[in-house]
Image (cartoon, rainbow, N blue to C red):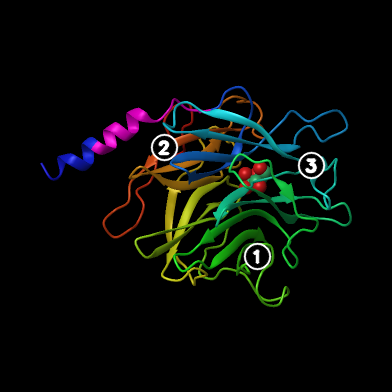
Amino acid sequence: MRRLIPLLLLAVALTSVAQNPIICDQFTADPTARVFNNKVYLYPSHDIIPPEGQRQDWFCMADYHVFSSDNLSDWTDHGVILRQEDVPWGNPEGYAMWAPDCIQKGDKYYLYFPDRPREGRGFAIGVATAERPEGPFTCESEPIQGVTGIDPCVLIDEDGIAYLYWSGAGLQGARLKDNMTEIEGEPTAEHTMQGLPEGFKEGPFVFKRNGWYYLTFPWVRHEGGTETLAYAMSRTPLGPWDFKGIIMSEHANGCWTNHHSLVEFRGQWYLFYHHNSLSPNDDKRRSVSIETVVFRPDGTIQQIYPTSPATTQD
Ligand code: FUB
């Protein structure tokens, strides 16, 4: 009986997850799921078909929507929460609102997002704040100083200290100041996470469970390959990390990217990830799916095999 109960709980969780992909009236990618006020809020990138004049075979994103659900099946679209034109330091025609994150501290919600600056090259990471998870969000006048790159993720530890992780030259991590808009220490300091294998890495998502920090990330394990989802564990928030392996293997249809978050909701952990299910001939227009996650007794994660329509190589 003691063995049956977890299996029954898992079966209930599986049947309560929506059919994949979960949002079908627009493209959604790079999903960060967070639990606020006993609901799951989803902060994805919003892939669009590139307008004329933009590169047609590349990512194209002009704004963010936020979605919420209290059963993981029915999702409410709260509409646009930030547009590229609303970013004071951003290029209003950059179409580069890539993977975001949102976190609550006190009575404020902080949206972290990459964008192309008006001046110069590359990406910076901005912060916008709101009083509610669905916005409206107001953007800070400058991006985070000393941080260049994409795919921000924020962890607030049990002691209240916040950490920012992002993808620059490799995966980076730094402590955030209490104001949540600046990193501690010298901007030029070495922030690269130690202990990770070779292979292009982006999209860090860090969470804590039972005293373990998990650094999860898309990882290309073979030269010329596409992205898996992989992870490493540590007893400290900035590593060094002990690489553990694959969470989800490469998409079987060649969709180059995957990007994800893991979240616990009502006692069950879920993986949110993306696949080009709604645009099989275009892997830059992606859609979010959900699977359940199983942790082994030692804290490691069982490999996840996506449910239809996504399939993986193994
Ligand atoms: O969505 C644009 C980029 O594709 C993200 O920043 C990466 O993580 C990859 O999913």
Q: Viewed as shown, does residue 7 lie left or right of 232?
A: left
> Which one is earlier in the sequence, the residue at label 1 or at label 3?
3
Is the shortest distance between ligand 1 and the CB of mark 1 under 8 Å? no
Q: Viewed as shown, does residue 150 lie left or right of 11?
A: right
Residue 61 visible in the displayed image? no
Q: Viewed as shown, does residue 117 lie left or right of 225?
A: right
Query: Residue placed at 87% from the left, 57% from the top?
Result: 120
Residue at image mark 1: 179
Residue 161 magenta-drawn? no
Percent from the top left, x then y, of residue 39? 46, 39
Residue at image mark 3: 84
The one nearer the camera, 296 or 117, is 117
Q: Residues within 10 Å of mark 3 (few under 14, many from 20)?
A: many
Q: Quadrant of residue 243?
A: bottom left
The residue sitting at the left extreme is 1
Instruction: Find residue 32 and name its label.
Output: none
